[in-house]
Structure formats: structure tokens, C-alpha cells
Image: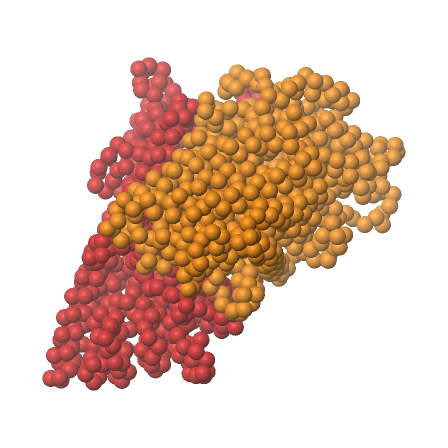
Chain colours: A red, B orange
Amino acid sequence: MANITKKVSWSSRGDDSALTGEGTPLLNGTEIPKPSRKLSGSGSVFRIGRFSTVDLEDDITSEEDPIRGRPKEIPHNEKLLSLKYESLDYDNIENQLFLEEERRMSPMGFRCLEISRWVICGLIGILTGLIACFIDIMVEKLAGYKYQVIKENIEKFTEVGGLSISLILWAVLNCAFVLVGGIMVAFFEPIAAGSGIPQIKCYLNGVKIPRVVRLKTLVVKVIGVICSVAGGLAVGKEGPMIHSGAVVAAGVSQGRSTSLKRDFKMFEYFRRDTEKRDFVSAGAAAGVSAAFGAPVGGVLFSLEEGASFWNQMLTWRIFFASMISTFTLNFFLSIYHGKPGDLSNPGLINFGRFESDSVAYYYYEIPLFMCMGALGGLLGALFNSINYWLTIFRIRYVHRPCLQVIEALLVAAVTAAVSFTMIYFSNDCQPLGPEHNEEYPLQLFCADGEYNAMATAFFNTPERSVRSLFHNQPGSYNPMTLGLFTLTYFFLACWTYGLAVSAGVFIPSLLIGAAWGRLCGILLASFTPTSPIWADPGKYALIGAAAQLGGIVRMTLSLTVIMVEATGNVTYGLPIMLVLMIAKIVGDYFQEGLYDIHIKLQSVPFLHWEAPATSHWLTAREVMSSPVTCFNRIEKVGTIVDVLSNTSTNHNGFPVVVQVLDSDEPAKLCGLILRSQLIVLLKHKVFVELARSRLSQRKLQLKDFRDAYPRFPPIQSIHVSQDERECMMDLTEFMNPTPYTVPQDTSLPRVFKLFRALGLRHLVVADDVNRVIGLVTRKDLARYHLGKHGLEELQLAQT
Amino acid sequence: MANITKKVSWSSRGDDSALTGEGTPLLNGTEIPKPSRKLSGSGSVFRIGRFSTVDLEDDITSEEDPIRGRPKEIPHNEKLLSLKYESLDYDNIENQLFLEEERRMSPMGFRCLEISRWVICGLIGILTGLIACFIDIMVEKLAGYKYQVIKENIEKFTEVGGLSISLILWAVLNCAFVLVGGIMVAFFEPIAAGSGIPQIKCYLNGVKIPRVVRLKTLVVKVIGVICSVAGGLAVGKEGPMIHSGAVVAAGVSQGRSTSLKRDFKMFEYFRRDTEKRDFVSAGAAAGVSAAFGAPVGGVLFSLEEGASFWNQMLTWRIFFASMISTFTLNFFLSIYHGKPGDLSNPGLINFGRFESDSVAYYYYEIPLFMCMGALGGLLGALFNSINYWLTIFRIRYVHRPCLQVIEALLVAAVTAAVSFTMIYFSNDCQPLGPEHNEEYPLQLFCADGEYNAMATAFFNTPERSVRSLFHNQPGSYNPMTLGLFTLTYFFLACWTYGLAVSAGVFIPSLLIGAAWGRLCGILLASFTPTSPIWADPGKYALIGAAAQLGGIVRMTLSLTVIMVEATGNVTYGLPIMLVLMIAKIVGDYFQEGLYDIHIKLQSVPFLHWEAPATSHWLTAREVMSSPVTCFNRIEKVGTIVDVLSNTSTNHNGFPVVVQVLDSDEPAKLCGLILRSQLIVLLKHKVFVELARSRLSQRKLQLKDFRDAYPRFPPIQSIHVSQDERECMMDLTEFMNPTPYTVPQDTSLPRVFKLFRALGLRHLVVADDVNRVIGLVTRKDLARYHLGKHGLEELQLAQT
């Protein structure tokens, strides 16, 4: 099963990349799960780490370890933490090179850097807006063409008879689009599947997801999402925008493309994880902003998912990127729609204008809204549970790319068939008003001058369906239509999410919610036919949409703001917030949020905001990994190469210790060095002996590290001769001389707070004479979570 | 001059409170300014701290210190950092008592705590909304009554002649109101003066401003703001709402009132700085939300000013409080206005509805908006500069309460006189339409059926004036009227801010900006009479208002969102943001923001978001205070009492060290204990000897510390007999055993980041064998700032 997991996991392509030079799982610490770890605060024996270099014995023990420690059968997928995900280095490595560079820089230099950051954010906004614009126009063109062809066909065959030909045409057209999208995703870039929001959540959380911010991913994502929306699947094009924005940001901010092998020699200062992650936050925000016309919502999304330490200037830049992105999209779409300069129509999805007068709410409606919130939570939990089992099924049985494409085609065909059937058997005919908003009104078996109401919901892009549920006149739908639509679309959307196509879940959720919300509104109005205030079911459609979306994705603050911004009316703030809150509380009781489920199924070491409340009795001593592989400040090259080559440990950060000569004092911590730094040092052969012999040798600079970023070569690709193995390397200049440390009695919440607030990757645990006794990394902290029966500890696995 | 500063400073009443039992300046570290400190990274000699207890010699040196180190004359007010401000203890003291309590608590207990937090936030929202409602109704009643009386009087005397009597009546009524407000503020609670935003900024930043969140302050603030708005000063009632919300939060969350001597035995768990500050954030947000109908803006305000580490649940609670506050205000105001249940009119200030159709903007207007932003920045800088000199003048010469009241009366009279003169000499008559919005249309010398347009601006509460500038029909004002109004109101508002009355600067700024913005709109329309798009000057009034407000207060993200929410139209997001950004950039070039000026003039050790960019060459060694007074883990009571009683040092946190017996090894850091804890220990006589003799003695619990919070008695009030002085105290159980430490080579930005992200109060600097060599506190970090000529170091002073 571990094997299967590997096949369909986010980093499935990363498995062969260990050979090609990236994605190697380089987490530090022991990879041995400790099922027998005693979870008692007092009296637990901890192993004193070894402080010298690794010797042959280490190889033997680490070969034994897996056999001894790892269970033969992995009990359950979600109770595992994968060791294959690396952390981002959000903490600045303040080594001597860095400090020297900073000291040399003038105040003017810092100002220039700041200006570059603003320029990059502006570029991110513009490019994200352009991509959104491209997706929107392409979808509109393709879907318009498709619906036009089918509509003509249906009209032809309605009179003649033989509508099954129309059905086949519809199914074939859908399948054609989905085939293209599915092949792109399944064969070329599996990470581009889905909405990309779970992946971006993880990235912003500090987990390095392989290939997630590559140019290729972007291309596949964009084409994929156009195909799946045009292919009539129950999906939205909004979620993928967030991923697209993030990729744009990662690309622009680095001033080069590794895929295209082009280096523009720009923004070289920003080639490190700290800066890159900040820009990716801006990109994600710009994506949200373009998708929903919600710049503030975008900023809050980025903060909710990514912020550790709130930085005002950064937030302001993120906001700038968001604003520019909405503006760009708006500007180009206004030109496309032939109304240049009309900027009051932002976002890919637009809920239309809710005028305060027509849809004001009264305080006695609030309890009703809260009930709808609870219903949304229940339905959301049901959706998530079904999708959870479906995902498990997919992990087990649908892991080959061709199977994935076939499943996608099946869904496309079924969607078309179900839609057609629903429309066919519907007898909800509505008069076609003079200024009707229907894009493709299907007359079918209705009288002349009427159209089929079911077709408004099914025979349309989901965005348009949402809008007509919100804004169509009371009486545009009869309750039966809405009920049937909710039911079928619920299961279609649930089946669709998780397919190997690029697609978001926002719009389907909104659509389901809007349908049953409108149904609620109609029923309420029918109970109290005299009261005029319940006359507009659009208001209830909005509340239902919020409830359903909240019940599925469980985002809180940012979602409220996104919804408020998308409706363009601040008045709805309180009810939307209450509804989302209730939906979350009710939903959380049964099942996690959809994104969290998918993150958990991938065994990503995701850090939440705080340590579990009941974890005060755990201390750093119990949490940390030990023994720790340390290096001496002046270390033999051979030792370093051996440690780095040891595939069974794959440590990634090494405390550097110093042994006082002629003394039996223990070695003391004096710094921390990363695998990536050592690789660069080895590649440039920065050996003490060579420095002496070749005085003219160029001193290694920060630039050399930046040039190698982010795809550092694997240790296997670096040739070190037997003579060189005997040389010494002086790490003083390159190590981070002031790593954060904690005493071993520090409680887990305190360790967690420090780790999370500063975005650390390694936290050294030192004793009272400053000896290294352990190392805390992400997986050590992510392992503890509050289950139904108190604190639980996840197993670590090499999946 | 130092004396004078003290007189009018925020903590002026705090000076005598050292005797009455609180507010003692308890900052740790040396109080000696080090003007001769060598600012070089290498080779600077640092003093090794002493690790044993303080002996008599310490008393002598610390008496000598002030003479040796403190300059005789304080050179300039704003180049100083005051030592009298304490920090908040945002970092949890995880001592054994705390850990035991947490360990005893069940998951259910934690859930109850979480629910209490929500309940408190709900209460904060409701109470803040009610206070806003009360202020609004009172102001409307009183101002309405006043304007009615004056209007009748003016109408009477317009025909008869002798309008000077009306002028006198107006001035007398204004003065009467201001007299009440001024006396309340100047004599009873000077901290209630002004908008309170600088004080709340400081509090959220982590500085304990004495008396700022007291019930008395709230009462004075509320009455004061009603009086000053009703008294016709150029002030708003919005700023003080933020302060009011903060006080409400501090009160509610503690479940007791020290002023009223009532303890409700509720929420005892929250009686510590960490929790209190979180609730105060929520209160401030609720205040913003009530003031502007901007719940999201409120959350962002709190985050911008207060957040260190972003906590999702906390943010969500803050948002809840904000929402409830807007809702409450809305609900009660709708009842008051006779339209119960109409909730679409949020906030104290309401910009009215900007319909997208009527005031849409086009992209070619954006450069115009940006120019207006620059103008706003210039005018804002001018405003701030004038106010800065005025404040310096006030600090020097207007420091007695009675003088302050007289100045306030003078301003009130002058405001009335100037307004009257402007109205009197204005000849801008406008026809009184059938559905006119003017509350008090003054006919004066206009023809029948017309009213004086100047009176719309002057003879009105500022909120109404803003609204009419935004929404009145094109042509309601002639350019001359607007120009004159801008000019006079600018200087009136500038003079008014900083008076000893409770008053905000938001509305006056908006009013000034709206006036010149509308003027710009009219002028633009007159240049291009054919183009209809520039026909509506209300749009330009909005942009002008944003520019002027941004130019004065220089808030960024939160202000944009507040403005967008107050206009209720998301479309204006981008122009408002651009305008605020330009206004900030232009304004910052000349002068700081108004709030920052006032914070600086009070010499508050305010920590910005990041360390100055060019400070990488400074290390902890140069920044820290040393020597440090440490205690042994088992310490003699006499020593502790002596150290605490030493008024010349007034340290507030003491590292606890342990000396290994029978060894000449140096003493090692093993914890940190606070003055407040020691005071409680001494009060309860927790001595080793007594514990042995009285076995039945109740063990000290966290509750005892919470009961004493926040007004710990001064050491002078605790009697320790000569026998007891010989006893020993065991600090093990009470100290924080895992204080954060940094090595001495850590760069200033790194120290700063750790300190700021975790909201620390004390950061121990330790050497490589874990000896204490220094302590970094807030003033050590706040001292460095980037001036015009690179890095500058502020002097520390005991003012």
C-alpha cells in the first residue's frame, strides 16, 4: 500500500528525481518511527546524542534501524507522517558571508531592494490578472461554442425526434475536452490536478512540495482548467487561479526560469526560501483576488494560510499585488466585453450586484440563517466524507495515469448524461421575459416563448448558474427543479473533486448551496405568503451558498471577506460570518475540511497554529530527534561526503560543534550548517589545503549559493577524489553562527510557538553547558495532534 | 524641561502613583544612557556581568551612576527614550505552577476556556456597540438642540439686525460644552485626551501605558467626546471609540473592576498580560468596527498595530467582536431612528451609498487620483508639522490643567467666531430643493427658498458635512466656498488636535480632504464642460478625503479597508489604495504620521516591525544591558528585598542562576523571575524555613498571582522583619525555567525578530557555557532607528 500511495501522491514524479537531481527527501533526524516511545513526562530515559563525526558504525545501525523500528505493514494511511517532504528555510542563514554583504550595503541599496520588491509584486499582479483573463476568455469562447452547437442540435432534434443523438453529441464534446485536460494532467504533471489549494496551503505552511511552483505546472494547470470547465464538469476555474498566482510569483521573483534555462540576471538577491515564500504569498493573494474580485480576501487568505510573523510591509505589498491583479483582469475584460474603462465588475466569478434595498435582511431572519449554516455544515461533512472514501479508493485502485484519464472521461460522460436526463424529464417551463439573462435558453418541450428552467442550471457554465440562482426573479425556478438539481449536482461535484483534472471546488459548492438555499427561500415564502420580506429567494441562495462552501472548505475569516467582497455589499457581513462559523463548528464535529483531508491523506507534516492544548506535559527532550549528526568546525572532507551520501539518514541540517583543544570538556554548539551549503562548498572545493596552495582562488560568495538555488545537485554528482577526502573544510564562515536553541525542559507548546513564529526548519536542543542533545524539526512537532481520545502521535514513514 | 515633559505626559498621574501603589517604572537593565558607547562591531570590550547576589557595593555604584552617566540637560525631547514605560509580559511564564495547572486541565477544560473567550468577545462587541450608540445619540440630541436654538436665534436677528448676539450665543454654547469636557479631561484623567489611538497603538505594541485601560478613563473619554463634538470643535467621535473599545475589553476580560472594587469571580484564568492584550486587540477592533461600520477594517487595524504572531483563532475572535459591535450599534440605532430591523446602515460615520453607476471611475482618471494623493501627502505633512510645533509649545508652556482648559475654551470660541464670520460673509446661496438633506438649512441673507451653502459645511456636525460633500448634487457648493472652508477648517483642526479634550482627527481630516477634493472635481469639470464623466464631484470628494486622511495618519492597509467598507463599494478599492500609498510616500518624505509624532514626543519605546535595515553589524553584545542583577535559585530574602527596594535601578526581571556546589565553575542560567512574582512571594512569605515549621501552610497557587494582577503592591508596602531577612526563598517552582536566550554574537535584526515575534519582555544573552552576560529589553531595541544620516541611537532618560 505504501507503494500505491507513492504512485498517486503529490510528489509522484519526484521519486525518480532523486536520480535526476532534486526532490531527495532530506529531512533531518531519525527516520525510525518510535511506536514504543514512552509518553510520560518524568523518568523517561533519553539518549545522549553523539557529538563527533559519523563513523562506520553509524552505517550499520542505520541499516538495522528500519528493520527494527519500522512496522512491516503501514496500518492506516492518514495516521502517518511522510518523511519525504522537506521544509523551507524560512529562517535567514546569517552567516559571515551574509552579514558582510548586508554590512556593505548602503541605505540606498536597501531602498533599491525594497523598490524591486514592489516592482515584482506589481508584475505578479499583472501576470496573474492576465492569466485569469486568458482563462476566462478561453472558457467563455469554448463553452459558448459548445453550448451553441448542442443547442442547435437539440432544437433540430426536438422537432424531428431522436434526441439521443444530441445526448451523444453533448457527451462526446465533453469527453473531448476532458480527454485533453486529463492527459495533460495525468501524464505530464500530476501535481497540477485538483484546485492546488491544498498544495499552496502546504507551501505557505513551510513544506516544500516538489514541482509545485514550476512553469510546467502552470502551463498544464491553465490548459487543464480551461478543458475541464469547457468540458462541462462540475468544477470551477477559481481555485486553480490561486495556484497559478503562486507559480507566477515564484517564477517572477527569481528572475529566471530553470525549465526554460533562461537567467535574466535580475532579482538575484531574492534567490532564497525566505524571500521566495513571501512572494508566493503575494502570488496566492493575487490569485484569490483575480478569481473573486476580492483583494482584501486575498490578503487574508495568504495570511491565514501562510503568515507566521505578521510583517506590515509584506502585507502591504501583498495587498498591492492583489489590487493590481483585480485591476488588470478588470481592465482587459472590460475591453474584451466592449466597455473599456468600466472597472466596476471585478473577478472571474461575480455574484452580481446585491442592492441593499431589494434584499435587506431583518434581525429575526438571523436564526434562520444560522439553521441554514448548520445544514451547510452537515451537507459539507457528508460531501467530505464521501470524497474521503473516494480518495482512499482512488489511492488504492486508480493510480495509473491511463486509469485516471478513463475515470475523468467517465465522469464527463456521466455528467452530460445526467444533465441531459434531468433537462429532458423536467417540466419546469418559464416564460422568456423581454430582457432575459439566459445565455442559452433551451426551449425543448416548452411552449413557444418559454424555456426549460432546469436547463438554466445544467446547460450553462457553473458561474452563470450561480448568478441566475442569486438574481433571477422570484418564481424562475420551481422547488422540484431545485431539489433535483441539488441532489444530482452534489454527487457529481463530489465525484469530480479529486479527478486527475485541474479544477476547483469553490464554484460547485456555491452552486449546490445556492440551489438548496433558494429552495429554502421559496419554501419559507410559501409558508408565509403574506409577508413580503421573504419574497426574494436570492438572499437565501446567497446564504445557502456561503453555508455549503463553508461546510466543505471550512475556511473562516478569509472566506467571509471573499464572500462579502464578491457580493459587493458590506451589509451581509454579519450573516455570512455567522453562517460560516456555524457551518464550521457543525462540520468539524463530523469530519475535517476538504483541503485538510487531502493534506492528511498525503501525510504532509503540516503545522497548525498552535500545539495541541493538552501537550504541556511534553518537553523538548521527548519531542526531539536524537542522536544528532554533528560536524566539527574544521571537518574532514571524507567524513562530510560519507554523511551526506548516507541515503538511510538523509539528514539536512547539521549542528557544528567545537572541541576545546587539550581539554576533556564536551564539544559545544557553535553553529548550524545545511546540506545545501555543504554541497556548494564541496562543489567549489573550498578546502583548507587548497586555499593555502592556490592563494589566487576566488573567495566563495553568497552569489555561488544563490546560483545553485533552488535545485542543488545531489551529493552523488559531486566527484571527490581520494586525496581530497583527506583535506579539511573550515565551516566557520558558512555556518549560521547563532542558531536558535532551547533547553531540554522547554514544553512542547513553547517549542512549537518559537518554531512556528519564526518559520524554523531546525531547532537545536542544548543542555546547560551548551552541548547538542537533540534537534527538533517539523515532523517532530507535526506528529502530535489532538484526536478523539486525547493526544495522539502519528507514525513516521518513508512513503 | 524634563519636569515640564513629565507634567503633560501620558503618564502624568503615574508619577505620584509610585507612592500609592502602582505604575512604578520597573524597566530592567541599566538606566544609564551610554552616549560614549562604541558602535563598532569588532573589538569592543564588553563588561562581564556579575552573577552573584547584589551586595552593598551595588548600591553605591548605582547611586553614582546617574551622576556619572546621565547628561545634565536633556538635549531634545524626541531624541529620547523614556525609561518610565514598562513592557507587557506577553510571553507566558511557564513555571511549574503553570505547567501543573495545564497538565491537570482536561480537554473539556480547554474547550470551556475557548468558549469563555468567545463569550467575552461577544460581550466586548455588545458593550462597545452600546457605547457607540450612546455617544451617537447623545451627540445628536445635544448638537441638534444647540443648532436649533442658534438657528432660531439667527433667524430672529437676521431680520431685526444685531447678529452679534447670535454669535455670542453660539460661542457661549460651544464654550459651555467644551468647558465640561475640558475640565473632565484636564483635571480628572489626562490620559483620556485626544483620540487615544497613539496610546492604544503603544499598548498593542506591548508598552504598558499607565491608566490607559481603566474604567475611569472610559467614563471621562465618553463624556469628553460628547462634549467636544457637541461643543462644535473640529473633531470627530470616531477615534475615541477605538480607545473605548479597548477599555471595555480590558475590563470585561478580567471579570472585575479594581476601580469599583468588584470582583465577579469570573474569567480568572485570563488575568495575565498575554490574554489581556489579546482581548484589548479585540476591543480596539470592535471600536473601529463601531466607528466606521468596518469590521474587516477593525480586524486589520488590530493586526497592523498589535499582532506579533498571527493566531488564526484569535483573529477569528477579533472578527467576531467586530461584527457583533457593528451589529449592536446598527440594531439599536435602527430602533432609535424608528426603522427597527433595518441593518444596512452601519457605523457611526456613514459615507452614504456610493452607487457604482453614478460614480464609476475610468482608468484615465487614475493619474488624477494619484496627483490628489500627492497633494494629500503634502497637506498632511504640513498639518503634522504645524501640529508638531504646536505640541512642543504645549509641552513647554501649556502644562497646567487650568491653562489647558482655557486653551480649549479659546479654541471653542474661535471656532464659533470663525464659522460665523465665514457664513456671514458667504454669498453662496443654493436653492432648497423639495427633498433637501440639510438638517439645519440657514437662510440668512439668501432669498426665500434658498439656503446658505457655507452653513452646510460649518453649521453642522462634521459627519453630516462630510456626507453632504460626498453626495450633494453637483453645483451645491461654489468653488470659493469650498476653498475658504478648506483653508479655515485646516487650521482649526490642526489647532484642535492635541487639546485637553477627547477628540478624534479622522473626521476633520476627511472633511478637509472632501472639501478640497470636491473643489478639484468642480475645477476639472469646469475645464472639460462637455465630458459628462467628471460631472459628479462627490467622487473627487471621496478621493480627496482619502488622500488627506492618509497624509495625516499614514495608516495603510487597514485604512484602505476602512475606507472601502465605509463607502460600501468595493470598486473604489484600487484608487483609494493608490491614493493612500502615494499620500504616505509623499508625506513620509517630509514628516512622520501624526500618531507617530505624538508617540515619539512621549519618548515611548515603540518597536517597529523590523530592525533598521542597516543594523546587521550590531550584535546582541553591543545592544544588551549589562551587568545584570541575578538571583540564586535559593536566595536570601534580605538580598531580594534590597534589590527590589533599590529605586535607582528598578529592575523588573531577574535571571536566576545556579552555582554548582564545591566547584569553581561559573554560575549557570536556570530561569527568569519577575519582580511581580517576587512581590507576591514576599507578601505570602514563601520562605524555606517557614514551610518547614508550618507544614499545614497552604501551597502558593497561580490564583494568588492572578489575584494580585495587575496592580502588584510596591515593595515598600511589604513588611519584612529582620528575622525574616535571614530566611531563604526557593525560586525553583516560580521562575520560568526556560527563558529564551541568544548567543552574544546574534545580530540585532535577529534579536529584534525573536523579541518582536514572541512579544518578549526580557531576552537573556548567554555565553557558550550558559552564563548570563546581559539582558535585552525593549528599550535596548527601540533605541536604534534609521535617521537621515544612517543609524541613530536615542538617549535613554528617566523623564
Q: Position of residue B563 (x, y in %)?
A: 44, 50
Q: Is residue B697 above or below residue B6?
A: below
Q: Position of residue B770 (x, y in %)?
A: 61, 29
Horizontal relation, residue A359 to residue B420: left or right = left
Residue drawn at (49%, 52%) of the image = B444
Horizontal relation, residue B484 to residue A255: left or right = right
- Residue nearer the viewer, B520 or A434: B520
Residue that sits furthest to the front in the current view: B160
Q: Is residue B761 above or below residue A474?
A: above
Residue drawn at (51%, 57%) of the image = B440
Query: Does the rendering let one see residue A18?
Result: no
Give the position of the N terminus of chain B as an image quadrant: top right
Residue drawn at (52%, 19%) of the image = B39
Q: How many marks?
A: 0
Q: Position of residue B51 (x, y in %)?
A: 69, 26
Q: Is residue B752 above or below residue B147?
A: above
Q: Is residue B662 above or below residue B97?
A: above
- Residue nearer the viewer, B643 or B449: B449
Q: Position of residue B318 (x, y in %)?
A: 54, 54
Query: Does the rendering let one see residue B430?
Result: yes
Give the position of the C terminus of chain B as an image quadrant: top right
Identify the image quadrant of residue B135. Answer: bottom right
Identify the image quadrant of residue B720. Answer: top right
Residue drawn at (40%, 79%) of the image = A522
